[in-house]
């Protein structure tokens, strides 16, 4: 089989600036990057495992990498190979690594057109370092729901900084024609402007601190329910789910902003509709009710609204669960300098490539296990870059 990893990985990640001084460059940066990408796809969770992978696969890696001084290791000591990987990834500029990742996703832009893009945050719990009083890193991810692809990510210093991180992430993405969904943290006028500027739609959870707008929308739905939505252009949809001793009912309602006179009460750009979801949960004889309100640029289309809201809630199982259970992200103890952020990109490369490989009808963890055993299967996975 013709091997492709060298060409494709170099095409997308070959432009990363080498952080090492000239005298320490015993190994090519693209070789280090390629070994790390292959290893993480195959299940490596840290630098020592990447070292073990490189040593075990040296003969195969040599068929498409130069490896002028063998598997990267400091001072030729193969027992400390992981030190080289750790140092390099701690110093690579995460903005460059992330930009290469985003550019790769842009190269397959046609795949994600008209998708739902869920913007959501996730804390890398293992990156917390009590000894140096270093807070855990919080990442904001963009997830293409239908195509199950990570489109990009931005690091924040704390969850509250998602407000500033989300616009940065949106600016590097190609989201034209997509529906962008964000939780209440992203309910900001500047974020909405950036989404509309890129010719995309939005469905965003309305935050209570948007005092006047929140009160107006809340009252609008209360009156609508009492009057049967008389005089309002509304759409309704209900779902019911049962299982594991519980019952969940969700009532979705959407109102056109024109009939609700929202445009005369707010300066939010392209605010074409508002939505409400009433979530009723019955379990062990107890009933809980939760109500959320949403703002949206969508016209009154209850099916699209319902799909967008449900898709955003599903990102926890579709992406975060995979990162934590299959790739053990929360257990990772990589903490030094830029390494946690860069390793997060390696995991997202693995999620995308393993997820795109459709011939094997198994989960990502099992696909990675097969890739570790079967070089030809790994080549098939890598060829999707």
Image (cartoon, rainbow, N blue to C red):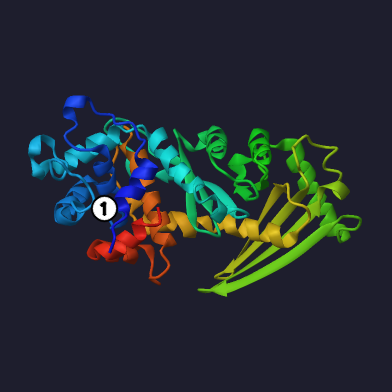
Residue for point 29% across, 31% down: 18
Foreground residue among 289 and 307:
307
For disc 1, the marked residue is 39
Left or right: 83 in relation to 264? left
Q: Can residue 344 be seen in this view?
A: no
Residue for point 76% across, 56% down: 254
Foreground residue among 224 and 70:
70
**Element at label 1:** helix
Foreground residue among 53 and 330:
53
Percent from the top left, x then y, of residue 302?
A: 74, 60
Q: Can residue 309 be seen in this view?
A: yes
- The image shows residue 237, relative to residue 111, as above or below, that is below
Left or right: 121 in relation to 194? left
Left or right: 176 in relation to 44? right
Q: Residues within 10 Å of mark 1 (few under 14, many from 20)?
A: many
Residue for point 23% across, 65% down: 373
Percent from the top left, x then y, of residue 39?
A: 26, 53
Percent from the top left, x then y, of residue 295?
A: 71, 46
Q: Which residue is most to the right?
A: 231
Number of numbered discs? 1
Q: Which residue is most to the front?
A: 2
Percent from the top left, x then y, of residue 271?
A: 76, 43
Q: In which quarter of the image is the N terminus?
A: bottom left
């Amino acid at each position: 089989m013709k091997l492709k990893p060298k060409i494709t990985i170099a095409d997308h990640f070959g432009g990363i600036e080498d952080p090492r001084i000239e005298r320490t460059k015993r190994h090519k940066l693209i070789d280090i990057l390629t070994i790390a990408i292959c290893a993480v796809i195959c299940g490596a969770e840290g630098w020592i495992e990447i070292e073990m992978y490189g040593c075990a696969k040296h003969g195969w890696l040599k068929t498409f990498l130069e490896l002028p001084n063998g598997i990267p290791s400091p001072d030729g000591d193969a027992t400390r190979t992981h030190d080289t990987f750790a140092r390099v990834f701690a110093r690579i500029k995460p903005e460059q690594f992330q930009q290469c990742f985003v550019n790769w996703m842009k190269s397959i832009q046609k795949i994600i057109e008209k998708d739902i893009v869920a913007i959501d945050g996730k804390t890398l719990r293992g990156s917390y370092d009590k000894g140096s009083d270093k807070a855990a890193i919080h990442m904001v991810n963009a997830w293409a729901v239908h195509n199950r692809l990570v489109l990009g990510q931005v690091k924040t210093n704390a969850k509250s900084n998602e407000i500033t991180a989300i616009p940065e992430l949106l600016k590097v993405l190609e989201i034209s024609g997509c529906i962008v969904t964000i939780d209440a943290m992203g309910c900001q006028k500047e974020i909405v402007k950036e989404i509309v500027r890129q010719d995309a739609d939005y469905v965003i959870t309305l935050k209570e601190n948007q005092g006047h707008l929140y009160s107006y929308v809340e009252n609008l739905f209360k009156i609508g329910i009492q009057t049967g939505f008389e005089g309002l252009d509304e759409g309704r949809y209900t779902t019911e789910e049962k299982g594991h001793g519980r019952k969940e009912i969700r009532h979705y309602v959407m109102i056109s902003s024109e009939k609700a006179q929202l445009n005369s009460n707010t300066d939010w750009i392209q605010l074409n509709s508002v939505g409400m979801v009433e979530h009723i949960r019955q379990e062990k004889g107890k009933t809980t009710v939760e109500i959320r309100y949403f703002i949206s640029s969508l016209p009154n289309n209850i099916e699209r609204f319902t799909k967008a809201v449900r898709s955003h809630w599903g990102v926890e199982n579709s992406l975060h669960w995979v990162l934590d259970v299959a790739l053990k992200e929360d257990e990772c103890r990589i903490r030094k300098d830029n390494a946690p952020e860069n390793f997060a990109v390696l995991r997202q490369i693995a999620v995308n490539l393993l997820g795109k490989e459709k011939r094997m009808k198994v989960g990502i963890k099992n696909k990675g296990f097969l890739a570790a055993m079967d070089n030809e299967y790994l080549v098939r996975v890598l060829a999707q870059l």
